[in-house]
């Protein structure tokens, strides 16, 4: 009896009390909730990290911006190099079109340096990634399509000086219309016209009539960005360079990396007057220079 009563008493003692049931149920709900929250946070973190990974990959895979600059680059000078430096800063890859001899003759007079030499000079500039030979002087519809679809060019770039064709139209009109044109600042105080003028003044003796011949000769080269011609002056020029290199500009032109600790450093000197393709070849003649750009 006592056992039965004890059993009955124990049975009623072990019976689930509604309060206990509530507590157990609450604990269970909380435990499941915490577990689910953990899962949610974990998957959220995974999802977020996957998202940032794919965004990073997208960023890395983003198509490089390819910019195109064309020009004659006759008697390549500092102004041309500065133009190429500015153009390369407008994109990730710089493609340069070197205008053919015939196109230059037809549009602005005979070039002093032939196209293969001008190609060597342009190719040696450290900001240039690719060079196209025999580029047209004006951006035609066909050539523009070729640039966009064959060379994947995003923007066509030129200095802020007007570039007019013999018929008076703008050589970059189509690129501007297509909204794919960008401009860089032309470097003051240096031009091929000016250099030709200075070369002609290098003769030891010259008469007044020589001087007139020189002026007309000088006028044949380029459209004459020289101030003297624009002013309608004699164009006799001066042997003094108007170019003023600032320390900021020198820093812009310098390499951002110094030579490595074990690098062999070679010294070469020279006047390097009218820097030309031969000077470039000399730099490349040293194997240690083979990876170095001339400018
Ligand atoms: N350029 C420049 N600054 C200079 C000379 C040229 O920024 N002092 C730029 C031009 O605007 C052009 C590019 O260099 O975008 C190539 O110029 P090029 O076709 O060789 O001819 P020009 O403009 O006539 O240069 P130059 O008078 O020296 O022959």
Image: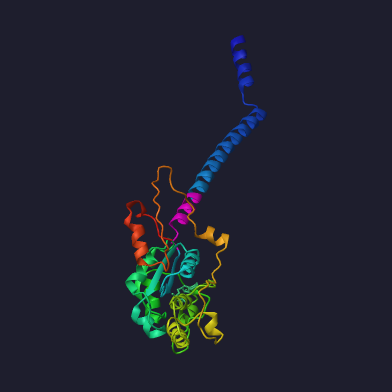
What percent of the width, then of the height, locates residue 278? Answer: 34, 65
Camera-side residue of 178 and 273: 273
| Spot occupied by residue 226 in the image (x, y as percentages of width and height) | 52, 79
Residue 282 position by quadrant = bottom left
Q: Position of residue 8 (x, y in %)?
A: 61, 17
Q: Residue furthest top?
A: 2
Provide the residue span drawn in magenta.
Answer: 51-64
Q: Residue furthest front?
A: 205
Quadrant assignment for the N terminus: top right
| Viewer can see residue 79 | yes
Image quadrant assignment for residue 140: bottom left
Farthest residue in the bottom direction? 167
| Towards the viewer: 166 or 288 | 288
Give the percent coordinates (x, y) of residue 221: 43, 81
In the image, taking residue 286 as reference, residue 38 lies left or right, namely right
Q: How many marks?
A: 0
Is residue 250 found left or right of 98 in the rendered image?
right
Do we see residue 1 in this rendering? no
Task: Examine the structure image and report whether residue 78 is included in the region drawn in magenta.
Answer: no
Q: Quadrant of the C terminus?
A: bottom left
Residue shown at 40% from the left, 45% from the top: 263
Taking depth in this image into account, of 28 and 1 the one nearest to the observer is: 28
Q: Would you say 229 lies left or right of 111 here? A: right
* Chief SS of the magenta region: helix
Q: Is residue 226 above or below residue 274?
A: below
């Amino acid at each position: 009896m006592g056992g039965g009563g004890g059993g009955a008493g124990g049975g009623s003692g072990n019976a689930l009390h509604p309060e206990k049931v509530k507590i157990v149920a609450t604990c269970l709900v909380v435990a499941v909730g915490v577990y689910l929250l953990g899962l949610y946070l974990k998957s959220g973190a995974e999802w977020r990290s996957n998202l940032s990974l794919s965004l990073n990959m997208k960023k890395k895979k983003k198509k490089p911006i390819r910019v195109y600059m064309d020009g004659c680059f006759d008697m390549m000078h500092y102004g041309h190099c500065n133009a190429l430096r500015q153009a390369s800063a407008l994109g990730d890859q710089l493609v340069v079109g070197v205008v053919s001899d015939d196109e230059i003759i037809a549009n602005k007079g005979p070039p002093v340096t032939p196209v293969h030499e001008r190609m060597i000079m342009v190719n040696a500039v450290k900001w240039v990634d690719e060079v196209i030979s025999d580029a047209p002087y004006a951006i035609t519809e066909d050539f523009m399509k070729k640039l966009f679809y064959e060379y994947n060019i995003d923007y066509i770039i030129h200095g802020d000086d007007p570039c007019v064709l013999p018929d008076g139209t703008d050589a970059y009109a189509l690129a501007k219309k297509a909204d794919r044109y960008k401009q860089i600042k032309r470097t003051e105080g240096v031009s091929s016209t000016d250099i030709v003028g200075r070369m002609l003044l290098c003769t030891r003796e010259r008469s007044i009539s020589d001087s007139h011949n020189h002026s007309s000769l000088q006028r044949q080269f380029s459209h004459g960005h020289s101030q003297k011609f624009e002013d309608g002056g004699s164009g006799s020029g001066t042997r003094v360079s108007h170019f003023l290199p600032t320390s900021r500009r020198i820093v812009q032109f310098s390499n951002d990396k110094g030579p490595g600790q074990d690098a062999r450093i070679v010294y070469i000197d020279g006047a390097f007057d009218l820097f030309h393709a031969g000077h470039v070849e000399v730099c490349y003649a040293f194997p240690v220079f083979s990876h170095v750009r001339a400018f």
